[in-house]
Image (tube, rainbow, N blue to C red):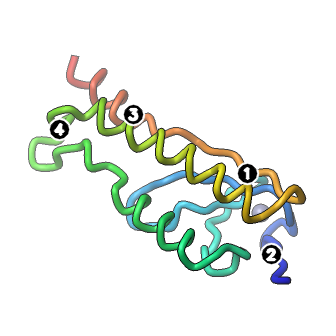
Amino acid sequence: MVEWICEQCENRYLIKLEADFSIEPTWCGKCGLSIDIYLLPLSISLMEELLMWGNNYGKWIDFKSDSLAENGIELEKKFNRKGLQLTEKVKNELGSNFTVDYKSSTSAEWYKNKDC
Ligand SMILES: [Zn+2]
């Protein structure tokens, strides 16, 4: 069995899922270090699903006008629902030795308030 350990804080059971631009959505839940997703004992199919999901991060922002895209709030909600589903899948694959948290994206809300 593959063991994962955070190279920075040596935590081996706290994982956080949080999507951001141009980076894998897997993080150390203790010190916040970005985790190379391939180091986690996950199936390739789930890794790919996570990476595809992460690539959709921010689709609700229109960078040309630096504002919220049409249906931006809906898109972010959908993204967060998918994120929670993936969190459950990750929990199932990593097993009960791990604690996996999901941090919701709030950038669409942020953009909405910014435009007000
Ligand atoms: Zn760490």
> Vertical placement of 115 versus 26: above or below?
above
Mark 2–mark 1 CB contact (< 8 Å): no
Pointer 3: what residue? 77
Residue 40: quarter of image:
bottom right
- Residue furthest toward the top? 116
Pointer 4: what residue? 69
Find residue 23 and report its horizontal and vertical position in percent. 46, 67
Could you say which is closer to the camera, residue 23 or residue 79? 79
Counting labels gives 4
Quadrant including the N terminus: bottom right
Pointer 1: what residue? 100
Which circle, 3 or 4, is nearer the viewer? 3
Which circle, 3 or 2, is nearer the viewer? 3
Distance of mark 2 from mark 1, alpha carbons?
13 Å
Q: Mark 4 or 2 closer to N-term? A: 2
The image's mark for residue 10 is none
Mark 4–mark 1 CB contact (< 8 Å): no
**Residue type at tag 1:** Val
Q: Mark 4 or 1 closer to N-term? A: 4
Pointer 2: what residue? 4
Where ligand 1 lies, by image quadrant?
Answer: bottom right
- Disc 4 crowd rating (10 Å Cα; few below 14, some 14-19, many 20+) is some
Queried on whether the Cβ of the residue with tag 3 lies below 8 angstroms from ligand 1, the answer reads no
- Disc 2 crowd rating (10 Å Cα; few below 14, some 14-19, many 20+) is some
